[in-house]
Image: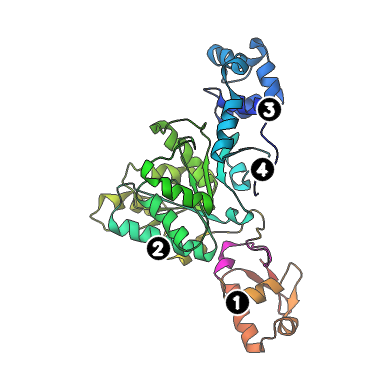
Amino acid sequence: MDQPGEKPDLDALRLALVPGVGPLLGKALLDHFGSAKAVLDAPRGQLLMVDGVGSKLASLLISARQQIDAEEELALCEAKGVAIVPRGDPAYPATLERIPDPPGLIYVKGSFTPRDELAIAVVGSRRSSPYGLRVAERLGGALARTGFTIVSGLARGIDAAAHRGALAAGGRTIAVLANGLDTVYPPEHAGLAEEVAGSGALVSESPMRRKPLAAFFTQRNRIISGLALGVLVVEATPRSGSLSTARHALEQNREVFAVPGPVDSLSSRGCHRLIKDGARLVETVEDILEGLGPLVAEITAAPDQPPIRRPAELALSDIERDVLFRLSDTPTGIDELIVLTGLTAGQALATLSILELKQLIERRPGGRYVRS
């Protein structure tokens, strides 16, 4: 999932730049016609056969090659060090591919790595309290040290604190912007944005010069949650935009976590409502690890380690990790584990008990064990 290979298809870029063609309609058009070129070559009558395409949009699609300068957009991307990554490209994040309405393409400054599939989104109020900023930065750093990539929106307040926590911990972080990557919003976060791009990626589905209009923030929130295994909300008023990210997470079958706050603070009410509705209350990283189930597919978090099956494996001790990774889907006896690990019988039994309690292994008849 590093850098994309070839330059994007210009017709695919033109299609994405047509006003009114969002991710769902774009997919419908591609499913109907087979390619972006075929969509832009289609006559009006055939375009109108696609649900969601009216007369105005059909006219925009027919005139796209004359009205939309895809070459200029691509040149601006190259000048700014931004890659255009369409769906289907090896660099397109697998987690984002699995949401109901993934972007047809994304703009990326920086890069993705396989370990970014182990990501947690941390979001919250722009008008945050000192308590919220402290908690967001602490949890962002702790999650990064555990091995998670931190995803947020580069906004003032909680978002920025989470990014800074991850960076201070030497971890990876991804910022999803509602505007185009030609500029940074808010402008005072330009330096932070460069740090994020150097230790992860800046991401947007918006054309390079698009301004940060209010309507685009809610739309981008589905990408923040879509890039993560779960969403952690730190401070949110009852009408906070962060709650829309939590709703997207639920729709995408992601976990939702929330940090409690002072009962007399308006910024606590959104989080408390989430907790009442079933979100997991978070005080430490362990609360998040306990709430995350098995991964959709194994992820190699580091080149010298076996693939991760459950996020909880990230927090194991060296001995626990050694024992776990000696196990597979084929049952292994304790005597064999003792030989493989060099542990005493007591150490091996104690470690197996811990791994079983954490639901990372299963005991089979005859005192043999397999990975869950």
Judge the density around disc 2: few (<14), some (14-19), many (≥20) Cα neighbours within 10 Å.
many
Q: Nearer the viewer, mark 3 or mark 4?
A: 4
Circle 3 residue = 31
Mark 3 Cα-neighbour bin, 10 Å: few <14, some 14–19, many ≥20: few
Residue located at (67% from left, 86% from top): 343
User: Which circle, 1 or 3, is nearer the viewer?
Assistant: 1
Check contact, mark 3 vs mark 4: CB within 8 A: no
Q: As displayed, is residue 304 above or below residue 246?
A: below
Part of the protein shown in magenta = 301-315
Disc 4 and disc 1: Cα gap in Å? 35 Å
Q: Nearer the viewer, mark 4 or mark 2?
A: 4
Distance between the alpha carbons at the discs numbered 3 and 4:
23 Å
CA distance for labels 2 and 3: 45 Å
Quote the CA–CA distance across marks 1 and 2: 24 Å
Which residue position is annotated with label 2?
138
Looking at the image, residue 189 lies above or below residue 372? above
Task: Give the residue number, with chain letter if any, for mark 4.
Answer: 4
Nearest to N terminus: mark 3 or mark 4: 4
* Secondary-structure class at tag 4: loop
Question: Label 4 is placed on what type of residue?
Answer: Pro
Q: Secondary structure at mark 2?
A: helix
Q: Which tag, 2 or 3, sits closer to the chain's start?
A: 3
Q: Is residue 82 magenta?
A: no
Residue 242 spot, x, y in % from top left: 39, 45
At mark 3, the secondary structure is helix
Q: Amino acid at mark 1?
A: Asp
